[in-house]
Amino acid sequence: MKFCKKYEEYMQGQCQRKKLPGVGFKNLKKILKRCRRHLQSRDNAALVPDHFGDSTLCGRSSSCPDSCPVCDGTFFPSLLKEMSEVVGFFNENAQRLLELHLASGFRKCFIWFKDKIQGNHIALIEEGKELVTYALINAIALRKILKKYDKIHYSKQGQVFKSQAHSRNLEILQSPWLCELMAFHINSQETKGNTRNAPALFNGCSLIFKDEKPSLSCELFDSVKLELDLTCSICLDTVFDPVSLTCGHIFCYMCACKAGSVTIVDGLKAASPKEKCPLCREAGVYEGAVHLEELNILLSQSCPEYWAARLQSERAERIRQAKEHWESQCRAFMGI
């Protein structure tokens, strides 16, 4: 079955229960078909007979200019709007689900009452699976439609658009909530109870180790595999107390504080907007950083010895930084 049909069937099945934003795969393909017909007619018009009676392409190229007059006016604006809606829906619902799961006591009851959510842990697990599937299948749809754009136009504008979307945090695979949901799914796999069968497209998530380096792995309909590296690129060790910057890169909390030129007492929100991500060099990525609580739980349970040793060493560093902070505050207050 072609992906377009599989995607349409998936979205129709989801929309029977509730309306979900998605990539207008069929409409976008129609736009590209119009452009292809325009290119073919343009190239046919440029064919002239040569000395031997054969037709040759005179002074024309089968590629479009950097800006296609036929489809760019509708294709990219439509796709950008759809991407924004998909990422917004996913982030909002994933954040709500994880807040409910991690909440306790009165706060959990308040969230249940406010959002009218069924207070059922099994229902949360199923919703988490569905959200991961939704994120991955829309990421694939985006990749395929942009690839088709570049194929028709003999260009790389699709990849340029994808890079621009990434810089605007509209790439769903860079969402910190996707990583959190994958960790939540793994943490919940041992939960006992009768659950519904997983969605047909979803083959589950797992934590894998290659050369003692961990990564999150997720598979979708036997052909698509997503892997998220869990090694901090600053300390080159397994991420400890992990945080995700708004660009999508994951670091240890203390490493991120060092990179953002702030202390752990001040926190990442105190980082200057000029501070850049150590990997992609994007600025202004610290204020919206997200603590990955579910990933923290998963790694602490999977690497207990490493976690205990790292916890001990970081505790000493945190105490040292806190002491220096309060000593400087006292000196400033006393005017010393």
Image (spheres, helix red, strand yellow):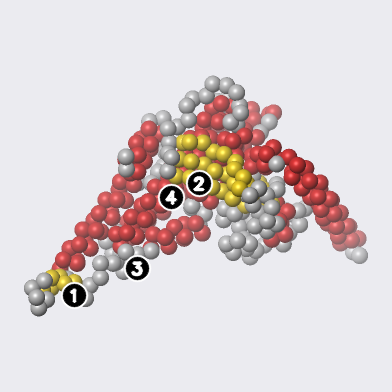
- What residue sits 70% from the left and 57% below the top? 235
Depth check: give the residue in front, 262 or 43: 43
Quarter of the image with the N terminus is top left
Mark 2 and mark 1: span between their CA atoms?
A: 46 Å
In the image, taking residue 174 as reference, residue 74 lies left or right, namely: left
First along the sequence among labels 2 and 1: 1
Quarter of the image with the C terminus is bottom right
Q: Judge the density around disc 4: few (<14), some (14-19), many (≥20) Cα neighbours within 10 Å.
A: many
Residue 288 in the image: x percent, y percent? 61, 52
> What amino acid does circle 1 point to?
Cys
Depth check: give the residue in front, 232 or 158: 232
For mark 2, give the secondary structure: strand
Q: Residue 226 shows which numbered tag?
A: 2
Q: In the rendered structure, are the residues bearing label 2 and label 4 in contact, judged by CB atoms less than 8 Å apart?
A: no
Q: Judge the density around disc 2: few (<14), some (14-19), many (≥20) Cα neighbours within 10 Å.
A: some
First along the sequence among labels 2 and 4: 4
Question: Can you tell which of label 3 and label 1 is closer to the viewer?
Answer: 1
> What amino acid does circle 4 point to?
Met
On screen, residue 272 above or below 244: below
For mark 4, give the secondary structure: helix
Q: Which residue in the structure is indicated by mark 3? A: 66
> What amino acid does circle 3 point to?
Asp
Q: Which residue in the structure is indicated by mark 4? A: 83
Question: Can you tell which of label 2 and label 3 is closer to the viewer?
Answer: 2
First along the sequence among labels 2 and 3: 3
Q: Which residue in the structure is indicated by mark 1? A: 58
Mark 4 and mark 1: span between their CA atoms?
A: 40 Å
Residue 121 in the image: x percent, y percent? 59, 27
Depth check: give the residue in front, 303 or 7: 303
